[in-house]
Amino acid sequence: LIGNARTDDSETSRDRVAFASLGFDLCGWLVDLHARCCFWIDGESAFRTSVMSQGVNGSASLNIVDYLRNVAKSVTSNGFEQWKNRALASYWSKTLEPLQATIPEKLEASIVRLSLHRVKQLHSLIYYLSLEDDPSGDELVNEARTLVDFVMYVSFVRFYAARRNGSSDSKASTDMFSALSQSTSVWTKYSDETYAKMFLTWFFVSLSDGCGSEQTKEGTLAMILSMDASFYDNGQLMSVFVETGLQVALSHFVDSVEDLDEASKLRVMLVGGNHKLDQLRQYTATTKANINIVSSRKGYSSAMAILRYLSSAPIEFSLGEEISDNLGVL
């Protein structure tokens, strides 16, 4: 089914993809139900028999666990680390390129949701194994991290593609980040700083859209998340929260600067660490141009919306080098 869907664009193939998408979603909710039941019934021993690992008549080809592992590994193998290391810089320079596709685009959202259900299931099982000092938990931790790699890759690529095409309300991106937003307390335990920044980049970009006159689904989702008190208790996200928020505000800000060419905008965004303010000063000195802020531009209002939100958010932060320099520019 998956192999045919990549090359066959017939109506029959599209129907198969639609049914497969519904099947993945149904399987995901069964996994969620199974994990909840195991919590109340018998903990670790019940988790050992997973609804996801049961094929039909012993058929390994229908084992969803193996399928998810294979999909995730196919994405996170060749060249993935290099892609991940430059993903954020590529996003700001508008040069982010996806790796070779391994699944049909229309199945990505449902497989992402299924993967996150599996991560939550693994998280519970890892907890029970840790109580017994069972070393087999390490293998499950690696599986959870691989699935998070896959989920963040697919979600961020779809988010970037939608922005590049001028869409601020992509259904695929909304569906994926909706699932991520509902499980931040779990998947962040198997992520790192890069993934936290990816998620928060989506959050702040969508939040600034939600403050505009035309409300978007992603903007509404980000606003709901911003009102969730537990969101601010997530240490992994909060460690880069202000830094990422100011980076997004800065990107909107430089878009509202009149006569600032694209190359200069890029240098301001990517100079790193500090000296962003020096980059703007250098630009005015070499071009003898005035830095005029066009307050009527959308970028200006978006930047101000993020700054107002950060000023009232229930968080504490120290003025590190990156934060101080971004504030200096703004």
Image (cartoon, rainbow, N blue to C red):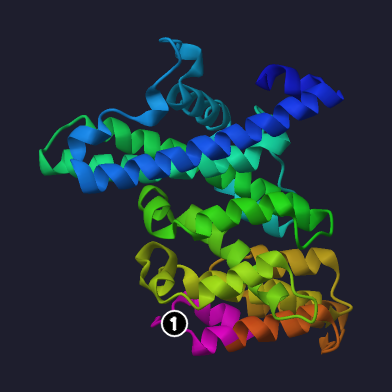
Q: Is residue 89 magenta?
A: no
Q: Specify the quadrant of the image occupied by residue 256.
A: bottom right
Q: Which of 304 and 233 is in front in this view?
A: 233
Whether residue 274 appears in this view of the structure is no
According to the picture, the residue beneath numbered tag 1 turns out to be: 319
Report if residue 316 lies within the magenta region: yes
For residue 119, side relative to residue 268 (left or right): left
- Which amino acid, by three-letter code, is at mark 1? Leu
Give the residues drawn in magenta, as a range.
309-330
Quarter in which the N terminus is drawn: top right
Q: In this view, does 249 lie above or below 83?
A: below
| Position of residue 42 measured from the top left corner of the image (x, y, whole percent) | 18, 40
The local crowd at label 1, few if under 14, some if 14 to 19, many if 20 or more residues have their Cα within 10 Å, is few
Residue found 39% across the figure and 21% down from its top: 54
User: In this rendering, is residue 273 above or below 326?
Assistant: above
Q: Which of 268 and 172 is in front in this view?
A: 172
Above or below: residue 182 compared with residue 204: above
Judged from this view, the residue extending furthest toward the left is 132
> Which residue occupies 62% across, 36% down?
22
Q: Position of residue 151 (x, y in %)?
A: 54, 43
The answer to whether residue 58 shows anywhere in this view is: yes
Q: State which quarter of the image contains the C terminus.
A: bottom right
